[in-house]
């Protein structure tokens, strides 16, 4: 149309070329809010009657049939999961039936913090890139200075938040292992017991779920003696279940999750194809930069933060905030140097240098996300 793209200095007009970012973010939000999966799921609180005690007992008695007919059990884990008798019993029953140790895909365990982190980061980075793109339209020295400093500031703020989430997750994961190792049916929580068997809204008497669950445990982990049945169940939780959960849970993020966080940057980079006067060589260089950035650098930055927070997860009573602050600074400094020497310079040199840098960054990212952080 005769309009010179943004990088050409001969024309003051700068077209907005970041529509892939805008459309991608809107589509992402639409799918997240309105997409209806076709899976059939069994959700105990919905599928087992919560007020009619006779139906509730029959639902608990039929739990084995639901679990037997299920291909997998998706566990959305938080810090309270293994303090609850209901949750622990269902997981142990599924593990007893399906033996997911032979097929780990039957028992995917996803921390709730992972979904929260991915969703907030994706939208935050996407919105920031849109604002940055709009501000970039003005293209003067003041705006460039503002953009540079604001980018550093927001990166540091994100690092503080990420470090806080990561350290908290590390503490909760360590506490989870202690909860499972010390699990006891007698001390595990039941909602009915926490309200002293009086419904807080209606004042009606609530039957004790613990009795129903004990009966189910006795049927599943059968023994001649009732007490021995509970002991067998508790030993199964403390040993077999602990091993399975440890194997399936992993770290705060996986490599696939780290790639998810790079999606807004990918949309932003795709938009740049329409914003520069590029020949074939420049297009190739731009593609190499996208591969290096989205497959290597961003997962490396995510893996580095997860690794740093896993090493500093312990709570320091007097200086815990300073530890989080220090983790964010160390992370920002390392990421800055890695971007300079691992992304920018190799892509400026040649395609093979960028390829080597990408392979190294991917290997480091996978090592930190799948190896060191799982322990």
Image (cartoon, helix red, strand yellow):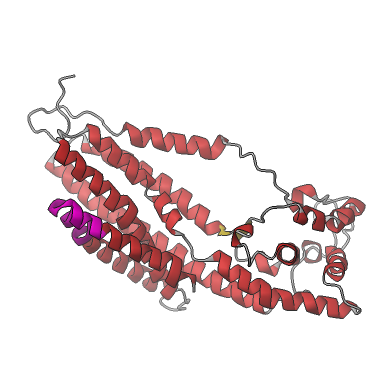
Residue 294 on image: x %, y % = 32, 50
Residue 155 on image: x %, y % = 31, 56
The structure residue drawn at horizontal position 68% and vertical position 79%, both measured from the top left corner, is 182
Residue 348 covered by magenta stretch: yes
User: Which residue is farthest front?
Assistant: 102
Q: Is residue 280 visible?
A: yes
Predominant secondary structure in magenta? Answer: helix
Tell me which corner region of the image, top left, top right, bottom left or bottom right, holds residue 107: bottom right
Does 188 sit left or right of 257 as displayed?
A: right
Residue 180 on image: x %, y % = 66, 74
Tell me which corner region of the image, top left, top right, bottom left or bottom right, holds residue 22: top left
Residue 292 covered by magenta stretch: no
Does 333 sit left or right of 35 as displayed?
A: left
- Is residue 341 placed above or below 1 in the rendered structure? below
- Is residue 158 placed above or below 174 in the rendered structure? above
Q: Is residue 312 visible?
A: no
First to last magenta residue range:
339-357
Observer-nearest residue: 40 or 89?
Answer: 40
Q: Quadrant of the N terminus?
A: top left
The structure residue drawn at horizontal position 78% and vertical position 48%, both measured from the top left corner, is 47
The structure residue drawn at horizontal position 16% and vertical position 40%, both measured from the top left corner, is 282
């Amino acid at each position: 149309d005769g309009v010179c793209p943004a990088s050409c200095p001969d024309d003051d007009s700068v077209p907005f070329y970041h529509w892939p970012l805008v459309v991608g973010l809107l589509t992402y939000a639409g799918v997240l809010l309105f997409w209806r999966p076709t899976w059939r799921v069994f959700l105990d609180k919905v599928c087992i009657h919560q007020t009619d005690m006779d139906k509730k007992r029959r639902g608990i008695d039929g739990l084995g049939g639901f679990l037997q007919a299920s291909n997998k059990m998706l566990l959305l884990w938080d810090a309270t999961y293994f303090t609850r008798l209901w949750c622990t019993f269902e997981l142990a029953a599924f593990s007893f039936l399906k033996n997911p140790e032979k097929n780990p895909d039957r028992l995917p365990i996803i921390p709730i913090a992972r979904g929260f982190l991915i969703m907030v980061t994706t939208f935050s980075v996407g919105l920031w890139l849109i604002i940055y793109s709009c501000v970039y339209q003005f293209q003067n020295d003041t705006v460039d200075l503002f953009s540079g400093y604001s980018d550093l500031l927001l990166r540091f703020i994100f690092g503080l938040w990420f470090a806080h989430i990561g350290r908290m997750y590390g503490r909760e994961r360590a506490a989870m292992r202690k909860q499972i190792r010390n699990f006891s049916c007698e001390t595990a929580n039941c909602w009915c017991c926490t309200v002293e068997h009086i419904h807080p809204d209606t004042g009606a008497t609530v039957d004790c779920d613990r009795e129903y669950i004990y009966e189910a445990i006795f049927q599943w982990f059968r023994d001649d003696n009732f007490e021995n049945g509970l002991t067998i169940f508790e030993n199964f939780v403390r040993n077999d279940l602990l091993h399975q959960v440890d194997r399936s849970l992993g770290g705060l993020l996986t490599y696939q999750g780290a790639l998810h966080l790079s999606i807004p940057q990918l949309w932003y980079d795709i938009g740049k194809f329409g914003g520069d006067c590029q020949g074939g060589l420049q297009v190739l260089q731009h593609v190499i930069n996208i591969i290096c950035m989205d497959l290597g650098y961003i997962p490396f930055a995510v893996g580095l933060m997860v690794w740093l927070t896993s090493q500093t997860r312990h709570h320091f009573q007097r200086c815990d905030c300073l530890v989080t602050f220090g983790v964010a600074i160390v992370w920002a400094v390392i990421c800055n140097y890695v971007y300079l020497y691992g992304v920018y310079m190799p892509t400026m040199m040649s395609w093979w240098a960028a390829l080597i840098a990408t392979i190294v960054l991917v290997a480091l990212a996978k090592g930190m996300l799948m190896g060191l952080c799982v322990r």
